[in-house]
Amino acid sequence: MATTNEARWIDQARQGDRNAFAELVRTHQGSVRALLRRLTGGQWALADDLAQETFLRAWQGLPRFRSEAGFGTWLYRIAYNTYLMQVRRTKGTSETYAASLDEDESQVTSSMPSLDAVAHGEVQRALLLLSPAERVAIIQCYYLGLSHAEAAIVLDCPLGTVKSHLRRALGKLRDHLGTSMNKRASDEPSEQPLRA
């Protein structure tokens, strides 16, 4: 649900007020960029380019915004479609995503404690095991905090499909992360009691 200010900015922006649209951009740019960074595997420059394209498309499409979904959900939909167009243009694959994780992981994890960095890296690698549809469902619902219904709007698919993608994705993540953590624990030297 739009705040009073957001509703006013939307109305003013529809009438061509660029300052009102700038307020909408300031309000939503962080979450749109976060979505695109997750979708691009942490490619910050690409995500920022796609965010700019998203907001340009939003400005051009604002007269068609019907307020049936929240403004942020509408922006996520535009951002996701912009990302998909980029993937089609570059014929992106999960290997591209994996390469970008290795290149950009130091940016993300340099400020994190080592245990958090390890866990973050494990989760990022586990996301690569998911199909693109499963991965984007996880990003929408667990990283962005959208409801299943909002994710269905963003992804333009039935609610049941989103739930199916999430169920399969969570099962795969649970299996992989459980195996990975068990392997990590068995690789660590066990403490032997000292004998006198």
Image (cartoon, grey):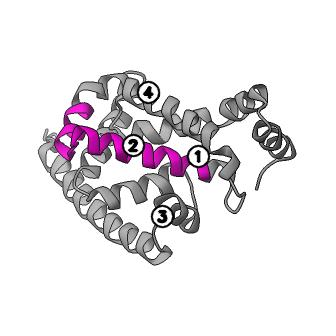
Q: Do the residues labelled 4 and 2 touch (CB within 8 Å)?
A: no
Q: Tell me how far mark 4 sits from mark 2, CA to CA.
A: 10 Å
Q: Tell me how far mark 4 sits from mark 1, CA to CA.
A: 15 Å
> Residue shown at 66%/52% (left/top)?
64
Q: What stretch is highlighted in magenta?
A: 74-101
> Residue shown at 52%/47% (left/top)?
78
Q: In this figure, which residue is indicated by the disc labeled 3? A: 156
Q: In this figure, which residue is indicated by the disc labeled 1? A: 75
Q: Which amino acid does label 3 sit on?
A: Asp
Q: Earlier in the sequence, mark 4 or mark 1?
A: 4
Q: In this figure, which residue is indicated by the disc labeled 4? A: 49
Q: Tell me how far mark 3 sits from mark 4, CA to CA.
A: 23 Å
Q: What is the x, y in percent for residue 170?
A: 35, 65
Q: Tell me how far mark 2 sits from mark 3, CA to CA.
A: 14 Å
| Residue 149 or residue 19, whichever sits in front | 19
Q: Which of marks 1 and 3 is nearer the N terminus?
A: 1
| Residue 21 or residue 100, whichever sits in front | 21
Residue 95 among magenta residues: yes
| Residue 97 or residue 184, whichever sits in front | 97
The answer to whether residue 3 is left or right of residue 70 is: right
Judged by its main secondary structure, the magenta piece is: helix
The answer to whether residue 8 is left or right of residue 109 is: right
Is the residue 54 above or below the residue 19 in the image? below
Instruction: Tell me the quarter of the image containing the C terminus.
Output: top left
